Amino acid sequence: MNLPGFVIRNAFRNKRRFALSVSSVAASLFLLVMLQVALRELTNPINDEGSSLRIIVRNKVSLAQPLPARQLQRLDKIPGIVTVSPFSFYGGLYKGDEKFTSFAQFAVDPKRTLPLLSDAKIPKEQLAAWIADQTSCIVGQMTADRYGLKIGDRMQFTGQIYPCDLDLKIAGFYHGTADDRNLMFHQKYLDELLGDPGTVGTWWVLAASVAEAPLVTERINQAFANSSAEVRAESERAFVLGFVSMWANIKTLIGGISIVVIFALLLVTVSTMSMAIRERFRELAILKAIGFRRRELFAFILAESFGLAMCGAVLGAGGAWVVFHSLDIQKLSNGLFVMFEVTPRLMGLAFSVAALLGVVAAIAPMFTVARTSVVEGLKTLD
Amino acid sequence: MAETIVKIRELTKLYAQGEIQVTALDRIALDIAAGEFLALMGPSGSGKSTLLHIIAGVDRPTSGECLVQGVDVTKLNESELADWRNQNVGFVFQTFNLIPVLTAFENVELPLLLTQLGRAQRRKQVEAALDLVGLADRMHHLPKQLSGGQEQRVAIARALVTDPKLVVADEPTGNLDSHSAHEVLGILQSLSQQAGKTVIMVTHDPKAAAFGSRSIHLEKGELTR
Ligand SMILES: Nc1ncnc2c1ncn2[C@@H]1O[C@H](COP(=O)(O)OP(=O)(O)O)[C@@H](O)[C@H]1O
Ligand SMILES: [Mg+2]
């Protein structure tokens, strides 16, 4: 036997407690990694060029306020814009769905939409058919698969926001975007059903380059400043994030939960180590009597505590890495998360937290051991 | 006359219990010769353990001196004392002496882990010590697989393995049946008679004390004879 062997023997003396402690550290770290990955993805835009090129322009007052259709002439003149299309969220209920339709329906201008759908793959003839027929639509492949849709099928929607129902013919299917679920139909058709109100929901803008996108955003905001319908332009990514923060300030929430998780983790490791050391008080006194110095006993305690935390980290953070690498998070989160990448930085964070906890959990027992004399230690249980 | 290994003068230990002061040891003077098997007797609370602990360097007196082989153990600092104990003192306690997760062999090996000795040398010494207490065949048993008497013999082997001059035992037979106690006392006796160790044993049992070469009595912190 040697000293490291002694540490290991001690750590495993109460196997069930060790397993439980390691598991709770692992579970907490798994959760922490998951939260941080989510936070990172929500705050750092993914490196999808299309999504940083696309800009969404909405009414400054609120998303629910429409924009005047005449703004299009002005937008067309703003430099740095490749194309602009109306982009009106219809938000209807698909026939057959009872309460909730899992895909969005947008009214757009099909002729102007093609560049906006830059990364979408759609057969030429299907696109042409869509442009040609004002009552037709294109549907994302995920939705098509889910409902078993075929070209030529008709889809009926009941209006939830707009006072009109839709009856659309499927002209084609697209795939290859970050979220292959949406349905797109003609803004003109919506206008007709509503009796030409001269409004659109939002504008969908494609900037000429990533570098120019922020400038374009600024120009658009400027262009309509002090007009009857002031706008707020933002990148598609920021827009989606804005959506998320509409129902909860996710960032603060995740930050808060992370802190609670770390705190729980601290309690677990600290109490495990205190228990482990307390029940060995007498043994530690005997070790002292035999000639073990404080620093050797400190090393034992630290090694045990650190080892416990690290086992938890390997299982928890390592487990998160394996799980998030092998699962299709995009599908599971209905497209909210796309990459869900466990970065080396986040792994580093998890292991640092664990290391820190391992050290912190060792402090109290070390103090107790330092303070207790051999004689006091021997008295316990005597 | 053999050389004096322990020389105690004016040794006093006071405990403050709130307002009241307890005098655990009251100006003790004591000489112990090398190779003696000293039985330290007295009623409960008379200061036996306190005296033993000071001699063995795990407790400090309030005043007075305690020289062991010429070294004043009361003047050593914590870390020096630890080293000193490792090299010079072997401990046997009343109960719960052994580390439960380690085998008999590993328990005995423990003090040697603090030395520079290599694996093979450690093994040799551990085996010799276990042989001496008649437990060579129980080397790989865990404490819970041993009887109380066997555990105490393993503890004696651990006390011996570093070949210290001094072996201290605090009521080593307190928890044993008379047969096991007899075995343990026989071993302690042979340590002093054959191996030339100085053994100091605390006991309140006159039958146990009879194994010693000398017995002294403590009463309320004072030596009575
Ligand atoms: N830590 C302590 N605090 C206060 N009094 C103590 C302490 N340790 C021992 N004593 C007192 O010192 C006296 C001697 O104790 P001890 O040496 O353990 O006696 P013995 O071993 O002879 O039974 C007792 O009166 C005991 O109550
Ligand atoms: Mg006692």
Image (spheres, coloured by chain):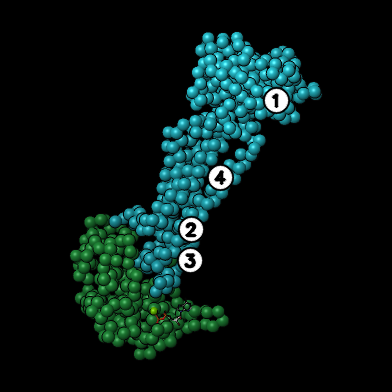
SS category of the residue bearing label 3: helix
Q: Position of residue A166 (x, y in %)?
A: 63, 21
Residue shown at the point (56%, 49%) measured from the top left? A260
Query: Which quadrant holds the C terminus of chain A?
Result: bottom left
Chain A: its colour in the image is cyan
Q: Which mark is residue A258?
A: 4
Q: In the displayed structure, does residue B9 sit left or right of residue B118?
A: right
Q: In the displayed structure, does residue A56 sit left or right of residue B205?
A: right
Q: CA distance from mark 1 to mark 2?
A: 61 Å
Tags 2 and 4 both on a single chain: yes
Chain under numbered label 3: A
Q: Is residue A219 visible?
A: no
Q: Is residue B128 above or below residue B170?
A: above
Q: Which residue is mark 1?
A: A163
Q: CA distance from mark 4 to mark 3?
A: 35 Å
Query: Which quadrant holds the N terminus of chain A?
Result: bottom left
Looking at the picture, which amino acid does disc 3 mark? Arg
Front-most of residues B119 and A179 = A179
Q: CA distance from mark 3 to mark 2?
A: 19 Å
Q: Which mark is residue A271?
A: 2
